[in-house]
Amino acid sequence: MNELAQALNNSMKEDNEHVYNMLSQLGKELFYPKGILSQSAEAGKKAHRFNATIGIATENNQPMHFQHIQNLFGDKIAPKDLFPYAPPQGKEDLRKVWKKKILNDNPSLNEELVGSPVVTNALTHGLSIVADLFVDEGNPIILPDKYWGNYNITFKVRRGGTVTTYPLFNEADGFNVEGLREAIQSQKAAGKVVVLLNFPNNPTGYTPLESEAKEIVAVLKEAAEEGINVVALIDDAYFGLFYEDSIKESIFSLLADAHERILAIKVDGATKENYVWGFRVGFITYASKSAAVLNALEQKTKGIIRGTISSGSHPSQSIILQSLQSNEFNVEKEQKFALMKRRADKTKEVLAKEEYQKYWTYYPFNSGYFMCLKLNNINAEELRLHLLDKYGVGTISINSTDLRIAFSCVEDSDIEELFDLIAKGAADLQ
């Protein structure tokens, strides 16, 4: 094993051996090399005469570039913030601003527990990094039965993890805390579980109530106290889009210092929060009371990035940074939130139609981009195809009974027509 990796591992063991034991074999072997990038970083600070280190070309004391590309940005973004490589961990100013945003959005979160966010190529990349760091073949991944299908590729196909599911909702249409407990306990012999919490949930659009969130934390603490190491992975892709009586902070805040055997990891990003899907800017943020643990996890994360994509898009990071720092950011954020809430409210209003009840019920939703219909005696895939072919309506079949509707991309004035057409399609098949 490389001596740099060994040094990081030793520092983790000294402060929290449980977190070290959560690492996959790959995670234990990872490190950030003292190579070209670290030497270039040192040169950037001290090489006041000539800096002949990093592999870019320069001209007239700035990065060499095509003017027609620079013209696309005008004088809004300087060449230095577009053309050179961004650091593997991301632009430092962006990391600082995003951490400040996390703390502002989650006022109960203790700043001393939170590491500096590492920039990823959006959320899927962030989840993939966590999988590499913490999942070996056969490791249990605990998920609700309503989950984003891409988790299968990320955790099962790529890393060989074993997915254990529990029903997301209980009989009272609330979060199924007891189901989560049973799923974790069923994997107790493994000694380690990855519990993936995605709120607002994709595909259902559900976020737990404050009381449910506290019960979730209690279940994870109970597991930790029984000797199970818990990687609490929080997928906050749709964070902030809370329309009703759910928690308004990330559950990351409650888990950040819950137990020494619980490692809370927040994966989020500008992608969906700030409506810049194609920019591919996400973040991984670790929580620990140990500075050594936070440093080791950051170095290992940088090592994965260096060994895969090398670094993320510099233009995207620069644009997101300017957006976060702009005076218009909060104003436009509130405007888009209000628009999304109107669509969610309209969806619930339309779904109250009595005539729909013979075709479906729907799962609780209070947040996010989506909601899910639970069909009565109609196959979801058959309905999806029928809606496409006969009515030109696109939906997503999750399984044989559930149809996901993204109200996020339907004007509120069109929502009633959308569900009327879905009902027509259901009537055709019923």
Image (cartoon, rainbow, N blue to C red):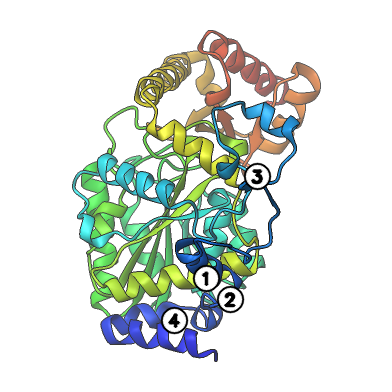
> Which residue position is annotated with label 2?
35
Classed neighbour count for the residue bearing mark 4: other residues with Cα under 10 Å, few (<14), some (14–19), many (≥20)? some
Q: Comparing marks 4 and 2, which lies closer to the viewer?
A: 2
Tag 2: amino acid: Gly
Q: Specify which label sits upstream in the sequence, 1 or 4.
A: 1
> Which residue position is annotated with label 1?
38
Q: Residue at x 49, y 90 (%)?
A: 3
Q: Residue at x 57, y 52 (%)?
A: 124
Residue 74 position, x and y percent, is 61, 26
Query: For this rendering, which residue is in front, 410 or 349?
Result: 410
Tag 3: amino acid: Asn
- Measured Cα–Cα span from mark 1 to mark 3: 25 Å
| Marker disc for residue 157 | none
- Measured Cα–Cα span from mark 1 to mark 4: 38 Å
* Helix, strand or loop status at disc 4: helix
Query: For this rendering, which residue is in front, 22 or 205?
Result: 22
Q: Specify which label sits upstream in the sequence, 1 or 3.
A: 1
Left or right: 215 with respect to 417? Answer: left
- Measured Cα–Cα span from mark 4 to mark 2: 37 Å
